[in-house]
Amino acid sequence: MTVLHLADEGEAADVAAFLSRLLHYDRGAAVRLQAAGTALAVFGRPPSFEVLAIRAVRLAKPYEDGLDVTLDVTVSAGELLESVDENAATAAVPAAVTGPPWAGVLPPRGGWQPRPGLPGAQELRAMVGAAVGEFRSRTEELTPELRTRAELDRIGREIWSRTVGDSGLPVRAVHAAQSLGFLRPSTRSEDLGLLALGAWLRLRTPYGSVAVRQSGRLGMLDVSVR
């Protein structure tokens, strides 16, 4: 069994926290792992947000497994979480699973360019708070016969599909970043970044990234299928 040696206990704790949050939204969640050199990227897709979440952590030593110099596998998030040993700063890679469709289409690795229009951290948190409050108030106003799953989903799509200013980034991406622990109260505006490449937008924070692909703009250069 392949064992990943993380840089320290903090990195192991961060991986465990990220996996726990993914499992909160989907108990059967899968994650795609990619390791090369001393970097490990964990990709997940919480269904409530329709975004791709990426948590990158450092390894204590370059990844190497026999003749392989990279790791690229989709595994159960729950099994991976169970294998994380925070004290030893290790994680055992579970057996591969048949990946969900999203796992075959990842954002490009390079070529990203800054996209203007991203508000500051405090404004982003306030925006999410206002959106959550609006969703709650609008759904509470519905009569019992109108409070159907279809109507709740319609209201949610309307609110969370709004864009953040002129940036093109949907509000749901910011909500996902906050819910997954990427946009923390201590996060400073200067630590945030909005990047674009083709159909992709990526909100970057010191604790992880959230990527979304804009519909209707999928092209050969916009995806990385591996």
Image (spheres, helix red, strand yellow):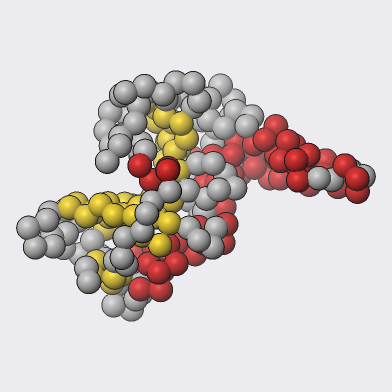
Which residue is at the front of the view, 154 or 202?
154
Q: Is 112 drawn above or below residue 71 in the view shown? A: above
The residue lying furthest to the bottom in this view is 87
Image quadrant where one finds the C terminus: top left
User: Is 99 placed left or right of 184 in the picture?
Assistant: left
At a point 31% along the width and 60% down the height, the residue shown is: 96
Q: Is 8 drawn above or below residue 45 in the view shown? A: below
User: Is 129 placed left or right of 190 in the picture?
Assistant: right
At a point 29% along the width and 54% down the height, the residue shown is: 73
The x, y position of residue 126, in whole percent, is 65, 42
Q: Quadrant of residue 131?
A: top right
The residue lying furthest to the left in this view is 67
Image quadrant where one finds the N terminus: bottom left
At a point 48% along the width and 58% down the height, the residue shown is: 29
Q: Is 144 drawn above or below residue 221 in the view shown? A: below
Q: Quadrant of residue 145?
A: top right
The x, y position of residue 98, in whole percent, is 37, 54
Q: How many marks?
A: 0
Would you say residue 10 is visible in this rendering? no
Which residue is at the front of the view, 142 or 16?
142
The x, y position of residue 28, in whole percent, is 50, 61
The residue lying furthest to the front in this view is 98
Q: Quadrant of residue 223?
A: top left
Would you say residue 169 is visible in this rendering? yes
The x, y position of residue 78, in whole percent, is 44, 67
User: Is 132 placed left or right of 54 in the picture?
Assistant: right
At a point 50% along the width and 41% down the height, the residue shown is: 51
